[in-house]
Amino acid sequence: MTNLHTIDFIIILIVIVLTLATALFAAKKRNDASGEEAVAGRSVNHWLLALSAGATANSGFVLTGAVGLGYAYGLVWLLLPIGWFIGDIIFWIFIAQKINDISRESETVTLSSFIVFYADNKQYINVIRMLISGLLVLLLSLYLSSQWLSIGKIINYIFDVDIVYFALSFGLIVAAYTSFSGIRGAIYTEALQAVFMLIFVFFLIFYSIGIYLNDAMSPSTATLPQNFLSLNGDLTWWQTILFVSGFSALSIGFNVGQPQMAVRWMSAKEDAIKKARWIYIAFVQFTFFTFILLGVFIKLSIDGLEDPEQGLVAFVKQASIPGFLGLFIASAIATIASTGSALLATCGEIIRVDIFEKPKQKKVLFLATAFVSIISFIVVYFSKSNVYTLAITAVEFIGSSFAASVIYIILFKKISSFSIISSVIIGFACNAIWKYFDYDNIINGALPSIVLSFIAIWIYESLNNKGKTK
């Protein structure tokens, strides 16, 4: 059991109080009667947009998964944020503003509604929307469980408490305040929590530099895996290109196909997208690079950890600086709670708007949030996976299943019901097969899945349009 200093408790308490106060403030600003509260009334400015989306993109993955990748495999995993950067650039230049424009034009407030709005065969729209919504909720619940698992691992290492029980307790608290603050509350608290994350990151950087300059650590490269400090690791030049390309596609799929991200783009003011671009990209890249590099740095000073995903907490705990551990716990709570809240609020709105079709009833949102929480808790209870596996699996399947349809709609503003269902099935199946044969070691499954789904849509729509013309 770790003893915390008084300043640690103060820092943690400040973060918790500010988070709850922000959620309460957002709850008072809600206006469910408008029918657009699922996108925060489309009133989000560029700073709120960039920081809230960045906090959602970060998630508990950076504190555990990213550090674990750097610790276990070395500098090669810096290729992940490099690939992600390329994907982000493509998304922000060609797609982000169009999602906002089309959602305003169609008055859609969820990803499911966005996908089916321009579809033909209107008699099947409700069924298709419900099927899409159900699959999204299930996959997002898997992603949500990775957040609870992440905080459970962190607290387990510090206080030696059961991972599952703490994860469930934390999840219940987040679900409680999310149920009354909704999407607007998630956006506001995410922006606040992004600030806490930046404070912690800067502190980590200065502390790590101080250790290195004062020779307080004795790095030994003798026991490191081969090519641990090489940027391309054991990859050849063509494997490096495929590795980066795969994560570029995953980045696009994440921004386009993840409902909690799509809602951010829909919720922005008309002029906020362009202003938010570089703030968001800088935040995501800065945190991604920092935590992967930190994992490498920790490997040089603390070797032999059983679980690489607990590397950061071991590093902070070893420092024994009053306030440092409290800042880390507060940052972890802030980061993971922000993503958890965003996922819960998004799932709740999908169920309320697309499945029950009652966008103005708070009671439905409360019940939906509780339902999604229970599903994610069940996954945590029975899961034997690490944070990276849970998170990346959910992200890959969502992007693979839905990104192609969204991109096609953005390009052509029309799509058939058959194409929507086919692209979901093809993308999902392709990614499942890719993972089954372990081809992720060659290239991330999101790339072939999204490309194959898009080609299938394009071929069918081309043939269908020719037939109509004749």
Image (spheres, rainbow, N blue to C red):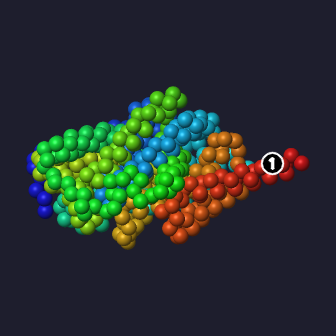
Coordinates of residue 358 in the picture (x, y in percent) = 54, 50
- In this view, the residue in front, 385 or 12, is 385
Q: Along the horizontal axis of the image, is 42 left or right of 63?
A: right
Q: Along the horizontal axis of the image, is 220 left or right of 226?
A: left
Coordinates of residue 166 in the picture (x, y in percent) = 26, 62
Residue 357 drawn above or below residue 35: below
Q: Along the horizontal axis of the image, is 466 left or right of 235?
A: right
Q: Amino acid type of disc 1?
A: Asn
Give the residue drawn at x 70%, y 48%: 415
- In this view, the residue in front, 163 or 354, is 163
Is there any visible trace of residue 279 in the rendered image?
yes
What kind of element bears circle 1? helix
Give the residue drawn at x 31%, y 49%: 293
How many marks the image carries: the answer is: 1
Q: Along the horizontal axis of the image, is 311 left or right of 324?
A: right
Is there any visible trace of residue 350 in the rendered image?
no
To which residue does mark 1 refer? 465
Give the residue drawn at x 50%, y 43%: 86
Coordinates of residue 200 in the picture (x, y in percent) = 25, 43
Q: Residue furthest right?
A: 470
Give the residue drawn at x 36%, y 64%: 386
* Snapshot quadrant of residue 154: bottom left
Coordinates of residue 445 in the picture (x, y in percent) = 54, 59
Location of the N terminus by quadrant is bottom left
Are there few (<14), some (14-19), or many (20+) residues within 10 Å of tag 1?
few
